[in-house]
Amino acid sequence: MFTKGHHLTYCTNIHPGESWEETFENLKQYIPKIKKELSPNQSFGIGLRSSNDASLDLTKPENLADFKTWLRENDCYVFTFNGFPYGGFHRQVVKDEVHQPDWTTIERLAYTERLFDILADLLSDEIDGGISTSPLSYRHWHKTKSDLENAIKTSTIHLAKIAAKLYTIHQKTGKLLHLDIEPEPDGILENTKEVIDFYKNWLVPIGTEYLVKELGISGWEAEKCLKEHIRICYDVCHFAVVYEKPKDVFKAFEAEGIKVGKIQISAALKADIPKDKNERKEMEALISPFSESTYLHQVVAKGLKNELTSFRDLPEAMNTLESTDALEWRIHYHVPIFLSDYGKISSTQSDILDVLKYISRKKVCNHLEVETYTWEVLPEDINLDLGNSIIRELQWVIENSGNS
């Protein structure tokens, strides 16, 4: 739905199911109810998650035609895809495999190109369309500096191929599409500095050379193409986990001409670490229910001198809780955005409020997508009815938008 200058939706990666049949059934089950509650008199936008297998089925003419008919009959539209998870995302161990296949592979390139073909067909002429994706790869897979640089270089060439494809689509159809790279803790790109360094030292120089040869355009046009079609997905949870303030990130990107294609509205867990040992035992009991086996829950600890220490997953951090000198932990765990605390632990909801306040005064992008995908693995006391939870999250965003 279009509200207060933005297309607002939720990401359908919230729903289990990897085939197109399962994906479509989830849309049929949930979307009409949500639309009736939140957007009865205007079109409702969908943030679609389609696995690789589902995307193969959706490219079949009969399936795409059926979906377009359903969208029209239900007054809905698709303006963004979540193209980060390629394969299974629910009811199995995902962990770091969420990055697989990464941007060093032809499989990731082909999957993303297919999603753009689908989105270009679905997208109306009046709006831009985006697909969020992995921050190149999972950094811990690349053991040496040389391995890491080779991964970045190969990924950059594949991204340049995407930019060439989107440039051609724009020239032929007038439809503006963009790939939105999603920085994440322990991704090759996880913070503002790394994003800016990537654009300056990899994407622009390597991508420009590729596009000049491939498209026959000037260097200036090639750089403009790259920054138009390769953007950033600002996931509020991810940047909060690495202790970066929204306004600082947005201003830094703007200064470098780096565009934000989508803001994913999400909240991380936050815990102030007590000094008292007994209180730490209590803290351990509160955090332990969030230590589950499906997703990675990276932890970044802040110390006395604001130094940051990263842990690959929550159990690794928990092993240090008794002896740590850290003052605060932030945990990559997409918790419900409408809750600010869970007793003695809290969320980074305030970062979402900061984002909503900032974008009410200065346009950053056109797309907002609520992304709380952990409902099935949340502790029982905060695991609420799914349909009503989606409605409640979107209502919370609407109620807290536009407040300067």
Image (cartoon, rainbow, N blue to C red):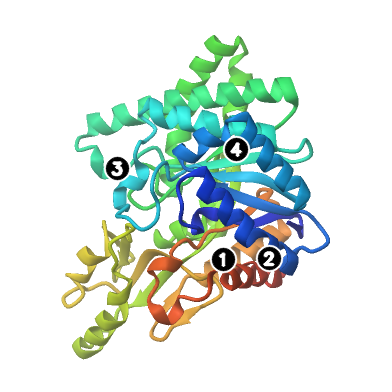
Above or below: residue 113 compared with residue 364: above
Which residue is labeled 3 in the image?
A: 139
Residue 252 in percent (x, y) is at: 54, 47
Secondary structure at numbered mark 1: helix
Circle on res. 257: 4
Q: Viewer-nearest of labels 4 and 2?
A: 2
Q: Can residue 12 be seen in this view?
A: yes
Judge the density around disc 3: few (<14), some (14-19), many (≥20) Cα neighbours within 10 Å: some
Picture residue at 68% right of the left edge, 35% below the top: 65
Residue 163: name its quadrant. top right
Which is closer to the viewer, label 1 or label 4?
Answer: 1
Disc sitting over residue 33 in the figure: 2
Which residue is at a point 32% across and 30% down the rendered structure image?
A: 151
- Say whether marks 4 and 3 touch (CB < 8 Å): no
Mark 4 surroundings: few (<14), some (14-19) or many (≥20) residues within 10 A: some
Q: Residues within 10 Å of mark 2 (few under 14, many from 20)?
A: some
